[in-house]
Image: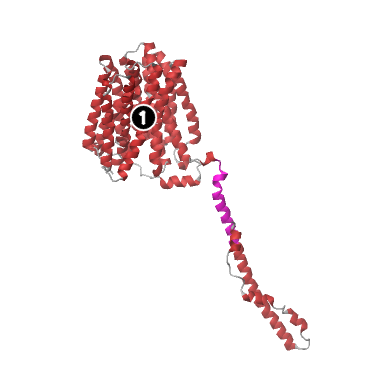
Amino acid sequence: MSFRALLSSSNFPKSPPETISTRAKPNPTRCLIRSPVNSPHGCRLSRLSATEGRRRSGKVYADVREIADSLRELVKFGDSLSDAVASEDDLDSAVPWWEQFPKRWVIVILCFSAFLLCNMDRVNMSIAILPMSAEFNWNPATVGLIQSSFFWGYLLTQIAGGIWADTVGGKTVLGFGVVWWSIATALTPVAAKLGLPFLLVVRAFMGIGEGVAMPAMNNILSKWVPVAERSRSLALVYSGMYLGSVTGLAFSPFLIHQFGWPSVFYSFGSLGTVWFALWLNKAYSSPIEDPELLPQEKKLIVTNCISKQPVKTIPWKLILSKPPVWALIVSHFCHNWGTFILLTWMPTYYHQVLKFNLTDSGLICVLPWLTMAFSANLGGWIADTLVSKGLSVTTVRKVMQSIGFLGPAFFLTQLSHVNSPAMAVLCMACSQGTDAFSQSGLYSNHQDIAPRYSGVLLGLSNTAGVLAGVFGTAATGYILQHGSWDNVFEVSVGLYLVGTVVWNLFSTGEKILD
């Protein structure tokens, strides 16, 4: 219903009786015509009556005109208001559905895609290393050195990537990272044929590119995603890593079988150019910089994102003096030792011990990653439910991380007692499935104990985790050259137990740093 129709149906007061009666009187000028010419008094009275009538009539007409003008203005305002409301209501129907999709979730999906490519390009070497080592006659120690060379560069850019992203913006840093590691991925076959030193350098360069991805992503999402959507967005982005591992491990054997091992690096590396083109066109470091962002969404993001004061000085001495900080660092090291062994060595384990061929080896490897993607979200739901029920954050963090340590330790000890490949794969999947509960343990603890310095703590603990990848991947090759797979798993189990003790003795869910 329009505003004009609404006014018509409303019970506005009628015109004053005086107006109607006055307008109903005969025209006073007629008295002048009917009055005798020789009657001055009569003419004077007639003139007075005419003058008074005109005064009264003019006053009444002015009142009527004023009321009418006011009503006209009100109607005009009402019509414009109705048009504005109608335009708001019709906005969804006027804008195409693809333009109605929230821009912040476009950014989240692009970050998800970047992490999908990140782990695709990382795990392809774990499959391709089998035909490569056969072609170039690499021993297990050399294979371990090649696998660990990725972490040399990855280690260098953890903290530096965060500082760079805070300075120039997450869009530039993440775009640089994807292009950098994609080029390094495509150059891997060329470097391998040139010689081992060239391959080690290219793999280290790839690590440099992937090392800036996580801090750049955190920088972007902290500006784009409201607090109420933060957990969902991070869960989606991190699941990109798990699904990237699944995709890489599933497609690599097929490409190697059909086109040879270099095709894996060429095809995966070229995908980065497609992503980068979309990133340049759609992404901005913050919603303020996006000229196409709808005002409603911009208002939602700006009013619901917590703006923290930037940290000007970092109290390193105070941070490193806190036992819960060291519990994070040590536990991250113990956790990542087992995780990175799975990432880099499991295809070799399935091939050598379980006697799977290359295709089966890659396909079977996806099961642990699918289990991790499911159980990580399950663990997050359980943890949030426990906290909402009144359980302390400290207790929840200790319980979830204890599952993340003791679960993998138990299932790895069973590998030496199973006889069938199916049971071995099941143990491996259960090991990594329980390992993913760490997302609700140590990975959530940085913001618990030091909200303002959570980036610094993540850089510190993740640096320890990368060191575990460097040492663990290389040590596994050395152990296999002089021992067996049982020895590899025993080291991982020992570190899981150490991490469990340290975590339960020194960790906390309470804030210890302002």
In the foreground, 419 or 288: 419
As for residue 51 lying within the magenta part, the answer is no
The residue under label 1 is which amino acid type?
Thr
Q: Nearer the viewer, residue 391 or 166?
A: 391
Report whether 405 appears left or right of 36.
Answer: left
Read off the magenta span: 73-96
Q: Quadrant of the C terminus?
A: top left
| Residue 465 percent coordinates (x, y) | 30, 29
Classify the position of the N terminus by image quarter: bottom right
The residue identified by callout 1 is 371
Q: Position of residue 502 (x, y in %)?
A: 22, 33
The percent coordinates of residue 87 (x first, y second) are 56, 50
Q: Is residue 107 above or below residue 492?
A: below
Total numbered circles:
1
Q: Is residue 268 left or right of residue 508?
A: right
Chief SS of the magenta region: helix
* Residue found 47% across the figure and 45% down from its top: 298
Which residue extends farthest right? 37
Q: For the residue carrying disc 1, how many other residues have a C-alpha within 10 Å: few (<14), some (14-19), or many (20+)?
A: many
Q: Is residue 164 above or below residue 141?
A: below
Colouring chosen for the image of the structure: secondary structure
Q: Position of residue 172 (x, y in %)?
A: 44, 33
Determine whether 91 is above or below 162 in the image: below
Quadrant of the image occupied by residue 136:
top left
Q: Quadrant of residue 373?
A: top left
Q: Is residue 346 left or right of residue 278?
A: left
**Residue 85 painted magenta:** yes
Nearest the viewer among 43 and 373 is 373
On the question of residue 165 being in view, the answer is no
Disc 1 is placed on an element classified as helix
Can residue 255 be seen here?
A: yes
Name which quarter of the figure residue 355 lies in: top left
